[in-house]
Every structure is written in C-alpha cells, then in structure tokens.
Image (cartoon, rainbow, N blue to C red):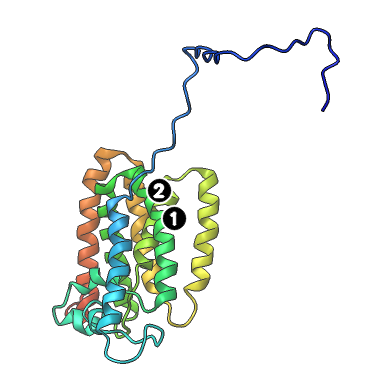
Amino acid sequence: MTYPTDPRHTLEPPGPERPPAPERPDEQPPTPPVRQPWPPVCAAVVGGSVALFVLDAVLRQGGSMLDGRMGPVFQRMALYGPLVQAGEYWRVFTCALAHGGPIHLLFNMSVAYSLGMPLERAIGSGRMILLSLVATLGASAFALLFNFDIPMVGASGMILGWGGAMFIVATREFRRSLLFWLAQVAVLSLLPGVSWAGHLGGFLFGVPMGIALRGGPRVFSRAAPMLLVIAMAVVYIAANPERFRGMP
C-alpha cells in the first residue's frame, strides 16, 4: 500500500454522497439511434421472394432446391414467351419474385436490401412502386424480344432498373461506385443461363425514370405514367410478334 506524498492531500471522512453536478442546459444526453422499419416495397420484394421460394420447394414433387428445376408455383410465375402470348400476362410481373435457386435468391435479395432500401427511403414508396413496375416491364419486354422461347425468373431486371434510376439521381461519388457495380453485372450478364436481355431492359427503362425523378415531383407525376404505358405497349408488342411483323 502506498500513500500520497503531496502534503495538500487530505483524507475526508466518509459521509453522505454528494449530489451530482447540475447539467448544463446545452448538454443533452445522447439519444439512442432509432431503428428504421423496412420500406414496404422492398420488404414485399424480399419477403415475397423468400416465401414463394420456400413454398415452391415444399410443393415440389421430388428433387431438391439445388437441382435447378422449378416447382409448381414457379411454373406458374416464370416468364415464357409462348405462354404470355397465349394470354398469361401476369408472368411479366410475377417472374420478378421467382428465383431459380438459393444462390440466385441470396444474391438478388442482398442487392435488393443494400440498394433498394436506401433508394425507397429517399424517393418514397409511391415512386418506388412505379419505378419497380416500369423496370420489371422493361426487363420482361427485352427478354421476350430477344429470348422469347427461354423461361426467365429473377428480380435482377427490376434491380437493374433501380440502378439505372440511381445512376441519374446519385451524387458524383456514389455514381462512381455504382458504375463499378454495373460493370460487374455487365460481365455476369454474359454468363450462360443469365438473361442479359432482362438486365439491359430493366436498366434502360430505369434511366428515364431517374430523369423524371431528377426533374422533381411535377415532372415525375406526368412522366412516370407515360413510361408505364410505354413499357406495357412494348411488352404487348414483344409478346405478339406475329401481329406486328412486316408492319411499315
């Protein structure tokens, strides 16, 4: 045990605890961070995709989730030109919630979480719904135009539409990192089994939506419905090529 050598130091007898010093009015205790809820559009995309993947796996007769075969749910949801041509137009939307395997699902949902949620918080859920619909239709339209007889599933086209819109409205620093991600996706789009047409269509339809977002609420409220109608028209033309082939 050691003792202080400073003669000014004195030991005080025990007594009642001293009250804490009053806080200065300008000093406020730190507030804990508030956990933000998931934006509803992205939450529906992620939750719906996962739930449908599990349901399809449960209803599948034989095989496993790793064999690449689609079960009864995804067979009704996948984009396939001849069936869309026969009148099953819901497939141009539902294909975005179907995924071909656990890796496909994990990759797309991780990007939907990291990219889509900040975007939805920035632009609002109403604009996010319109952007998602236009991007999904654009991806389906290009897939029908270039890969009419090949089934397609996945949210990649819709996510690329989000990326196309963000590329227009983002800051210069974020645009650089986004450009690097888009370059990676472009390389992956060249792999066998990946729909480059769906990726390209989603991105190209997302860019004008980003231009509309950059123009402000008034411009977006007028341009978004027009772009939605244009995307629906392109889907109809792509799904019925025999009706428009040979037209001047």
Q: Mark 2 points at which residue?
A: 118
Quadrant location, the N terminus: top right
Please, what is the three-letter code of the amino acid marked with disc 2?
A: Pro
| Residue 211 appears in the figure | yes
Q: Residue furthest bottom?
A: 62
Quadrant location, the C terminus: bottom left
Per the image, label 2 sits on a secondary structure element best described as helix
Which image quadrant is residue 96 in? bottom left
Whether the residues at callouts 1 and 2 have beta carbons within 8 Å, the answer is yes
Which residue lies at the image location 35% right of the left edge and 72% below the top edge?
Answer: 154
- As rendered, which of 184 and 20 lies closer to the eye? 20
Please, what is the three-letter code of the amino acid marked with disc 1?
A: Ser
Provide residue 12's location: percent of width, then percent of height: 68, 11
Provide residue 236's location: percent of width, then percent of height: 19, 71
Which residue lies at the image location 50% right of the left edge and 14% below the top edge?
Answer: 23
Per the rendering, the mark at residue 135 is: none
Per the image, label 1 sits on a secondary structure element best described as helix
In the displayed structure, 71 sits above or below 163; it is below
In the displayed structure, 231 sits above or below 69; it is above
Q: Classify mark 1: residues with Cα within 10 Å, few (<14), some (14-19) or many (20+).
A: few
- As rendered, which of 21 and 226 lies closer to the eye? 21
- As rendered, which of 3 and 40 lies closer to the eye? 3
Q: Classify mark 2: residues with Cα within 10 Å, few (<14), some (14-19) or many (20+).
A: some
Q: Name the residue under label 1.
A: 114
